[in-house]
């Protein structure tokens, strides 16, 4: 299934590594400087920070939460004197492939028409020194203790950044504190070196996750200065952000650092086993023409060369499906992740944290940017792809999808089958396994149909982002015009705020019907759309028929 395999080929943004060593982040200034005023200053354990007005919120950007040497766990940053301006994003993790695969990007968003006179996308600086977070709060120094919503960015474990979200609207509307962050990725954050480097590198395969844990520790120690409540922290994210959230739910090291979880289109059932991760390391060392145990050379290598080695390995080790993580991803670790979070069942640790989880109805159209033929299938083409996707199950599934979606094209049925198999099925499994252990999970599906590209995309992967952050205007290219996107954004963001506040998404402010917890009897699911509703087991036939294909 070529459109699925491409996601492990690295984050193929069309940019260069120019300026990759620029760390970004905080700048020093005098307390009385023109950049801000005394009422926008917050006191942290490291020193004082000055923020800036951002709409109806106050933003602090590029706040350093840790420092780290290559492949090493992070440590606390040094304190500073005076006041530091926190008004610009810090560096994102090293990730850009300067030699991307030929052809169009696999992410179909690149094909959306840009608004007239829109400025070109800003090229964000990238650096190994990327441990920065950003904070949006509705008020400072008013004695408030607001729920805290910590966003983990997508891009699997290979790319992405927390510097492309805007938490101002969500912070102001929901009276919450919103945090986004950057952390180490790909070979810099997830190279398993324990077998060749010994005890000093025991956790090298998980230092990207250790960065996130360090950020949560910083939040625990400092968020009250920004009007937040360290006892009410929600971690949530889409795609890879959901997988990272799943890791944290089962990690002893993250215990007590957050009390609610949101997994959007990123079910994290399993991560990497140590033997598979060791084989990936062998391949990386070979591609980089290093001796098998030459850790010193690997640590001293220029970032550009190590990144090129990562992209070469990831192109050779494509996944079989969306939830598979064949290389440069978190690894089972006795101290950090002693078992898979939700395979074969839910971790006892994970079940202590209530969770929102769900998927979008047509997730996989997002990954078809380099697969134009996928939108032009005939019945024979659909059958071929279905067999490639689910093997012998295709014979039973194709008539089922034809009956469930009468009048739809073969391409649309393929996208639906692929989306159900790749994301919906494991998301339901994660909710099932949570409930079976006595944990609380609320399941949803986003059904709102994007009008983009003549309506061929449906409710695609990542479309919920501007809805959850209550920024529908920023998502107009996907969401379309008219009042429906703004109303849906108000309702979804209100449900997520209620969950961050009380551990339950139900609230009068959302205007939604009552949303029951998920169990294997009722299987209540919130369907978000122009008219949102709760339905019991809305994909029962597909869930039951696809069940044998999950296998984990």
Image (tube, rainbow, N blue to C red):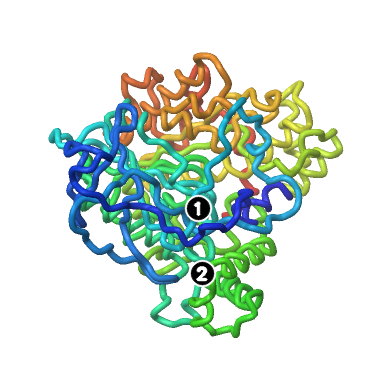
Dot 1 corresponds to which residue?
269
Q: State which quadrant residue 64 falls in.
A: bottom left
Residue pictured at 75% horizontal, 24% vertical: 408
The crowding category of the residue bearing disc 2, from other C-alpha atoms within 10 Å (few below 14, some 14 to 19, many at least 20), is: many
Residue pictured at 54% horizontal, 84% vertical: 294
Check the picture and name the quadrant holding the C terminus.
bottom right
- Residue 522 appears in the rendering: yes
Q: Is residue 245 left or right of residue 214?
A: right
Compared to residue 342, the image places residue 447 above or below, namely above
Q: State which quadrant residue 361 falls in.
A: top right
Alpha-carbon span between mark 2 and mark 1: 20 Å
Q: What is the number of callouts on the image?
A: 2
- Residue 404 appears in the rendering: no
Q: Position of residue 196 (x, y in %)?
A: 50, 82
Dot 2 corresponds to which residue?
191
Chain-order first, disc 2 or disc 1: 2
Residue pictured at 37% horizontal, 32% vertical: 496
Q: Give whichever of 31, 317 is nearer the camera.
A: 31
The kind of secondary structure element at disc 2 is loop
Q: State which quadrant residue 65 falls in.
A: bottom left
Q: Give whichever of 391, 283 is nearer the camera.
A: 283
The kind of secondary structure element at disc 1 is loop
The crowding category of the residue bearing disc 1, from other C-alpha atoms within 10 Å (few below 14, some 14 to 19, many at least 20), is: many
Q: Position of residue 513 (x, y in %)?
A: 40, 19
Q: Is residue 480 left or right of residue 315?
A: left
Compared to residue 483, the image places residue 424 above or below, namely below
């Amino acid at each position: 299934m070529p459109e699925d395999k491409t996601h492990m080929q690295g984050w193929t943004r069309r940019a260069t590594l120019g300026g990759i060593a620029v760390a970004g982040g905080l700048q020093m200034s005098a307390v009385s400087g023109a950049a801000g005023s005394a009422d926008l200053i917050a006191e942290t354990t490291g020193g004082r920070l000055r923020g800036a007005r951002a709409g109806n919120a106050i933003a602090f950007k590029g706040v350093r939460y840790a420092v780290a040497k290559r492949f090493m766990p992070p440590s606390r940053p040094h304190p500073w004197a005076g006041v530091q301006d926190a008004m610009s994003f810090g560096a994102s993790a090293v990730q850009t492939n300067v030699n991307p695969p030929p052809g169009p990007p696999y992410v179909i968003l690149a094909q959306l028409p840009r608004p007239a006179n829109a400025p070109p996308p800003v090229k964000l600086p990238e650096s190994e020194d990327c441990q920065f977070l950003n904070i949006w709060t509705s008020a400072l120094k008013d004695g408030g203790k607001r729920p805290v919503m910590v966003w983990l960015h997508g891009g699997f474990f290979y790319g992405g950044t927390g510097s492309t979200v805007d938490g101002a609207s969500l912070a102001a509307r929901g009276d919450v504190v919103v945090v986004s962050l950057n952390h180490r990725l790909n070979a810099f954050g997830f190279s398993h070196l324990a077998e060749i480097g010994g005890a000093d590198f025991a956790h090298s395969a998980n230092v990207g996750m250790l960065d996130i844990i360090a950020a949560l520790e910083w939040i625990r120690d400092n968020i009250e200065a920004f009007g937040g409540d360290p006892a009410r922290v929600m971690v949530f994210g889409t795609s890879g952000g959901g997988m990272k959230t799943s890791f944290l739910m089962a990690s002893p090291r993250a215990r007590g650092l957050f009390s609610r979880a949101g997994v959007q289109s990123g079910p994290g059932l399993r991560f990497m086993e140590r033997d598979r991760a060791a084989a990936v390391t062998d391949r990386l060392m070979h591609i980089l023409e290093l001796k098998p145990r030459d850790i010193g050379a690997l640590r001293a290598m220029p970032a550009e060369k190590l990144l090129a080695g990562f992209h070469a390995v990831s192109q050779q080790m494509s996944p079989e499906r969306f939830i598979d993580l064949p290389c440069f991803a978190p690894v089972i670790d006795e101290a950090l992740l002693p078992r898979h979070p939700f395979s074969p069942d839910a971790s006892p640790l994970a079940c202590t944290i209530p969770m929102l989880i769900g998927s979008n109805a047509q997730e996989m159209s997002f990954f078809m940017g380099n697969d134009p033929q996928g939108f032009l299938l005939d019945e024979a083409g659909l059958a071929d792809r279905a067999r490639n996707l689910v093997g012998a199950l295709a014979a039973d599934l194709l008539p089922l999808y034809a009956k469930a979606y009468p009048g739809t094209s073969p391409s649309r049925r393929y996208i639906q089958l692929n989306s159900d198999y790749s994301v919906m099925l494991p998301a339901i499994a994660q909710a099932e396994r949570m409930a079976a252990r006595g944990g609380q999970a609320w399941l949803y599906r986003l059904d709102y149909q994007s009008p983009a590209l003549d309506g061929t995309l449906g409710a695609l992967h990542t479309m919920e982002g501007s809805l959850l952050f209550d920024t529908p205007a920023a998502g107009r290219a996907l969401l379309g015009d008219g009042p429906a996107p703004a109303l849906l954004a108000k309702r979804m963001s209100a449900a997520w705020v209620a969950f961050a506040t009380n551990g339950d998404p139900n609230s009068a402010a959302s205007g939604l019907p009552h949303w029951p917890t998920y169990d294997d009897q009722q299987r209540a699911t919130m369907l978000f759309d122009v008219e949102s509703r709760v339905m019991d087991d809305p994909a029962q036939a597909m869930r039951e028929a696809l069940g044998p294909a999950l296998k984990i």
